[in-house]
Amino acid sequence: MPDVLDQRRGALGQGPPAAPPLVPRTRPDERPARRTLLDQIERLETEFSSLFVSAWPRKGLAFSVTSRGGPRVLALAELEQLRDDLSREVDDARRTLSDRTWVEEQHRCRIEDMLLEPEKHKWVRVSNEDIGEPGCKHWHVRPRLGVLGLFMNWWRIRISSGCPLAMGWGASP
Amino acid sequence: MSDPDLERGWIDNELGEEFPGLGLWLTRVEGGSGRSPELVRRRLRQLSNRITGGHVIHMRQDPVPWAYRVFWRQIGIDPDTDRTPVEQIALDRLRDGGLPSRNLLDDAITIATFETGVPVLALDADLVGKAVGLRTTGKKELLGGSGRRLSTGQIVVADEDHTLALLSGEVAVERGVTKSTRRMVLGAVQVKGVPLISVEEALWTVADTVTVGG
């Protein structure tokens, strides 16, 4: 085996010098590729914006794709990277939003059940935030007439009237 | 007052091919800045009262702000970090609880930008050349000729000799409007999806406001 390798090495060393790599005479036109990428970025940004609007007022959804040090004309590779990042963010946002809305739907169904049979949902509390709505309203299953209701198994649902006022009623003018 | 004449700024070939809808519109106005008259302050207050949280959230889907968001993204700026001017105004209004008056020119630009969605920049006409346009920077260029160093390939508003402002809105201090300014050049960048009428309205609103106080 070493003999064979030595022979090959010798043959390589004695052969003609390797030809220089071929350099294309004309530069490829990047314009169509760039146009396609810019159009894709436009579509993704549109989708990104509509997801952001759909997500409001939910919290904890991050919407950001790193800046590329603009304003400048991005290179083809940078445009591709931006398109990929945006696409990934849109996918993540869509998935997260989909998960959230599924949970919110479950909470909505739970509110209906709480209204129909409060005794089966003792002490359960569902807030507006849980169903993806703005405001401080919440549904809370509590015993009717306090301790008496607790012992008699009389339950009802209390719906709060919303956010507390910025200034209490008793505040001086 | 008659509407001021608009002139079209030149666009570098590379930029024009990359962004077919890109344009720079300019108008020259006699006058400078100063303290805002009560009329302008009142207009600013009325504008401020119209801006609500829901409005700001949905703004990014309105055609003109959306067009600038897309353009921001395409030129490598994250519009959720470095906001487009109209979104920045709306966000400042929510954060500060109002739009405080700063000076006549800034107030006029705020009103015009919010009403139309089109960002406007102002330069001192006596410190700017005749041919103003958009191009990318070469090596070792300074903002305004003597300001901070700009990296190669940045998109700038420039005249024959100097860069004047970055496309994202930063104006060179030595070319901007000061107390001694007597004549101004107002400029607005049009991008794909923004109708010319919005650009015209933005420039006319600023011109009107600074010359006759709104």
Image (spheres, rainbow, N blue to C red):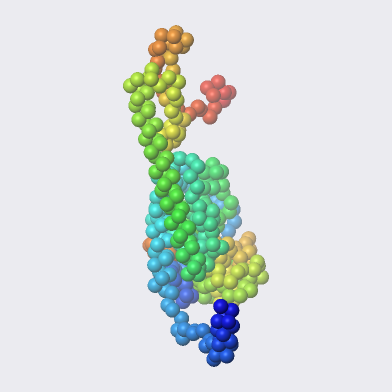
**Looking at the image, is A40 positioned above or below residue B48?**
below
- Residue name at image x 53 percent, y 57 percent: A66
Residue B109 visible (yes or no): no
In the rendered view, does B71 fall on the left or right side of B178?
left
- Residue name at image x 48 percent, y 61 percent: A82
Percent x, y of residue B188? 48, 64
Q: How many tags in the picture?
A: 0
Between A48 and B71, the one lying in front of the other is A48
Between A34 and A28, the one lying in front of the other is A28
- Residue name at image x 40 percent, y 62 percent: A40
Determine the residue located farthest toward the left in the rendered image: A116
Percent x, y of residue B35? 59, 53
**Looking at the image, is A7 positioned above or below residue B52?**
below
Percent x, y of residue B91? 51, 47
Between A171 and A17, the one lying in front of the other is A17
**Looking at the image, is B157 positioned above or below residue A24?**
above
Between A8 and B38, the one lying in front of the other is A8
Query: Which quadrant of the view contains residue A88?
Result: bottom left
In the rendered view, does B1 fall on the left or right side of B138?
left
Percent x, y of residue B170? 58, 62
Residue A59 visible (yes or no): yes
